[in-house]
Image (spheres, rainbow, N blue to C red):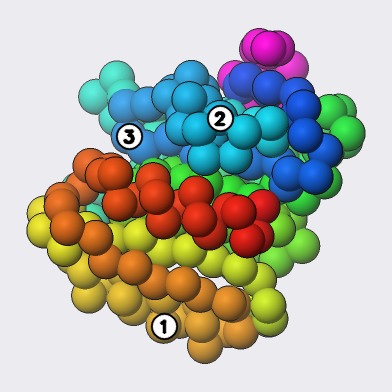
Amino acid sequence: MRSDSDDLGFIHRFVPGRDQTRVPLLLLHGTGGDENDLIPLGQRLSPGAALLSPRGKVLENGMPRFFRREGEGVWDLADFGMRTVELAEFVLRARAAYGIGAPIALGFSNGANIAWSLLADDPTLLAGAILMRAMMPFDPRPLPDLSAKPVLILAGVDDPMVPVDQAALLAALLGEAGAQVTYEVVSGGHGLTGDDLSLAASWLARHG
């Protein structure tokens, strides 16, 4: 297992793939996480896949995030756009440095939100996305052509932070742009459940 600092622009970890048939995963943590958080999840969901896991650069009360917000569900949209471009540039550098193809983004909460923004900013950057507890508190249209881009959206029916209707709106808009969207609502709240893991593993078996 290889661990790296910020030589490519982000503090991150990279785990080389052992199974070259597996699509690499870009792991994007939630608020308060870091580059280590989702490594075990990635290894569990897609054994042998290469894993790229950056740490968000924004601090909110000392907790790493991928973009600023002004309050719960209130995003700093200028920062959101800038951080999307910054992270996309890191992914391109990392792909070249580590010799990997376009990854599937696996993001949780804040990480899931920056993941769909990466997809919308440059559809060629990612092979697809798993968005766990993502939201869309504004209308991002016009969206690019996302034809046949596979996306799994997992929402919690009792999530106090991400209303199910916002997750459903995200699914609808990505589908409107042509993405091959699978939208699932699981029992539970904002935290991940066994159903999330089962659904994500099954989806990756088909797309990863």
The residue that disc 2 covers is 43
Q: Residue at x 63, y 61 (%)?
A: 206
123, above or below 102, in the image: below
User: Callout 2: helix, strand or loop?
Assistant: helix
Residue designated by label 1 = 172
Question: Residue 31, labelled with which disc?
Answer: 3
Label 1 element class: helix
Q: Which residues are magenta?
A: 1-11
Q: What's the amino acid at mark 3?
A: Thr
Q: In the image, which is nearer the foreground, mark 1 or mark 2? A: 2
Residue 104: x %, y % from top left: 64, 51
Classify residue 107 as left or right of residue 124.
Answer: left
Kind of residue at disc 1: Ala
Q: Is residue 79 visible?
A: no
Asked whether, in this view, residue 42 is left or right of residue 146, the answer is left
First in sequence: mark 3 vs mark 1? 3
Disc 3 and disc 1 in contact, CB within 8 angstroms: no
Give the crowd class for mark 3: few <14, some 14-19, many >=20 residues within 10 Å.
many
The percent position of residue 13, horizontal first and vertical second, equals 62, 20
Asked whether residue 129 appears in the rendered view, the answer is yes
The structure residue drawn at horizontal position 39% and vertical position 71%, both measured from the top left corner, is 183
**Disc 2 residue type?**
Gln
Indicate whether 179 appears above or below 85: below
Whichever of callouts 1 and 2 sits on the residue coming sooner in the sequence is 2
Point 46% across, 72% down: residue: 182
Prevailing secondary structure of the magenta residues: loop
